[in-house]
Image (cartoon, rainbow, N blue to C red):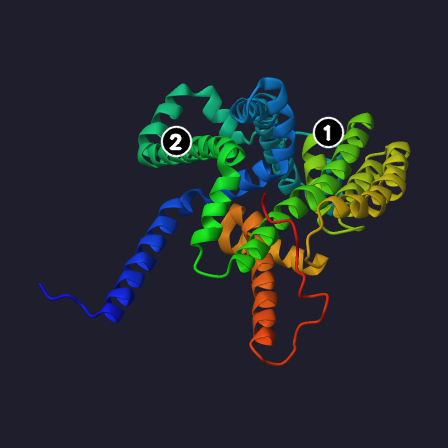
């Protein structure tokens, strides 16, 4: 057996290592979203777990108590609410699509009115024999649909299991895992710390700086819709929360058409009240609370860059792009800043301003 020269051995081993790391990355790739979110949740929840651990008598018990609380307090109500929201969203979409024009669509948004089944649907309901014929004619297609739903449900269940398990593992062993990564990463430890800090900054910025602002506006809008008797208030509240990604004017894309629909439906008083709440309450929340939450979870991306990253991520990666888009852009920005700093240290042109060299702080502890 021929033994390679030392240099060729090193190159060969590096190639094998690169292939193995790429294979490991491909193995974890299907579940990158729950793993990324779990790491963010664990980092933000670690101080709370430390307090719980003092009461429960250990970090493992504290982490377990928090994960159980996440399942019982957050996930179960969220799953029930998501099912209700889905039905309401489908109902709202059908009402708008079946409207005869813009005026009818606005009235449908503000006044409800579930779409009535068409003549074919009524005829089908009156004739059980036709149901059998429909199943025979489209049995293969129905089986594919059922199989697709079952596969998607299985993927969701596995993803949720990985998420909650990962939160527990990161809470218990996260600091040790980070130290191992810092020691074995193929670049300088200072670079690893800066990238890790940017990674966690993205999570705090999305959850706290952006998410809490939108959640606050969505809750206020939902309360207003419910108080004024607007149907599908939860769906409209969720849309208001999503629209809050566009500062100041984004929420008006939801509450303004709803107010116009109320006016067209003959509910002038309710329309005026909703318009007043939108202008003086919801918009004020955006102007007041966004800076407060931004201080707790500041994301070093401009509003334009963040929105472009979110929508571009959705277009490129699907639903997961909502978090992957901003994460990739933020890490790319940090990498470019590190590269500029390295060039200046190697005797290149001084491209880094004094404030840029510091970069984000707060690498995982």
x%, y% of residue 182?
Answer: 49, 52
Q: Residue at x 53, y 56 (%)?
A: 192
Q: Which mark is residue 346?
A: none
Q: Is residue 107 visible?
A: no
x%, y% of residue 176?
Answer: 49, 40
Quadrant where the N terminus is found in the figure? bottom left
Describe the element under mark 2 as helix, strand or loop: helix
For label 1, the residue is 231
Query: Which residue extends farthest left?
Result: 1
Question: Mark 2 or mark 1: which is in front?
Answer: 2
Quadrant where the C terminus is found in the figure? top right
Residue 13 against residue 157 in the figure, above or below: below
x%, y% of residue 255?
Answer: 79, 41
x%, y% of residue 188?
Answer: 50, 61
Residue 349 against residue 58 in the figure, above or below: below
**Closest to the observer: 322 or 168?**
168
**Closest to the observer: 365 or 308?**
365
Label 2 or label 1, whichever comes before in sequence order? 2
Q: Residue at x 79, y 33 (%)?
A: 220
**Closest to the observer: 122 or 170?**
170
Question: Tag count in the figure?
Answer: 2
Describe the element under mark 1 as helix, strand or loop: loop
Between the residue at mark 2 and the residue at mark 1, the CA separation in whole angstroms equals 31 Å
For label 2, the residue is 150
Q: Residue at x 85, y 34 (%)?
A: 266
Left or right? Give the position of 327 relative to 248. Answer: left
Q: Residue at x 71, y 50 (%)?
A: 298
């Amino acid at each position: 057996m021929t033994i390679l020269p030392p240099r060729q051995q090193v190159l060969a081993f590096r190639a094998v290592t690169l292939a193995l790391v790429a294979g490991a990355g491909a193995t974890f790739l299907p579940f990158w979203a729950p793993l990324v979110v779990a790491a963010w949740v664990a980092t933000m929840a670690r101080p709370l777990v430390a307090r719980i651990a003092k009461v429960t008598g250990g970090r493992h018990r504290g982490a377990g108590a928090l994960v159980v609380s996440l399942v019982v307090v957050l996930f179960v109500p969220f799953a029930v609410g998501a099912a209700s929201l889905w039905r309401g969203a489908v109902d709202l979409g059908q009402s708008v699509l079946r409207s005869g024009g813009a005026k009818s669509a606005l009235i449908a948004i503000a006044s409800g009115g579930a779409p009535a089944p068409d003549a074919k649907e009524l005829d089908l309901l009156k004739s059980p024999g036709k149901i059998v014929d429909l199943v025979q004619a489209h049995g293969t297609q129905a089986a594919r649909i059922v199989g697709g739903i079952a596969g998607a449900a299985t993927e969701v269940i596995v993803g949720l299991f990985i998420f909650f398990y990962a939160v527990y593992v990161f809470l218990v062993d996260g600091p040790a895992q980070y130290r191992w990564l810092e020691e074995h990463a193929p670049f300088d430890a200072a670079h690893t710390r800066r990238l890790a800090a940017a990674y966690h900054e993205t999570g705090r910025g999305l959850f706290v700086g952006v998410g809490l602002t939108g959640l606050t506006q969505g809750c206020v809008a939902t309360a207003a819709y419910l108080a004024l008797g607007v149907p599908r208030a939860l769906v409209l509240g969720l849309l208001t929360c999503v629209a809050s990604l566009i500062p100041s004017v984004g929420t008006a894309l939801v509450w303004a058409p709803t107010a116009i629909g109320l006016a067209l439906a003959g509910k002038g008083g309710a329309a005026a009240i909703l318009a007043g709440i939108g202008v003086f309450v919801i918009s004020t929340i955006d102007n007041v609370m966004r800076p407060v939450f931004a201080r707790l979870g500041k994301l070093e991306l401009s509003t334009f860059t963040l929105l472009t990253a979110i929508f571009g991520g959705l277009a490129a990666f699907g639903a997961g792009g909502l978090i992957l888009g901003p994460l990739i852009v933020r890490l790319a920005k940090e990498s470019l800043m590190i590269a500029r700093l390295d060039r200046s240290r190697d005797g290149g042109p001084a491209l880094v301003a004094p404030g840029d060299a510091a970069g984000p702080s707060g690498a995982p502890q």
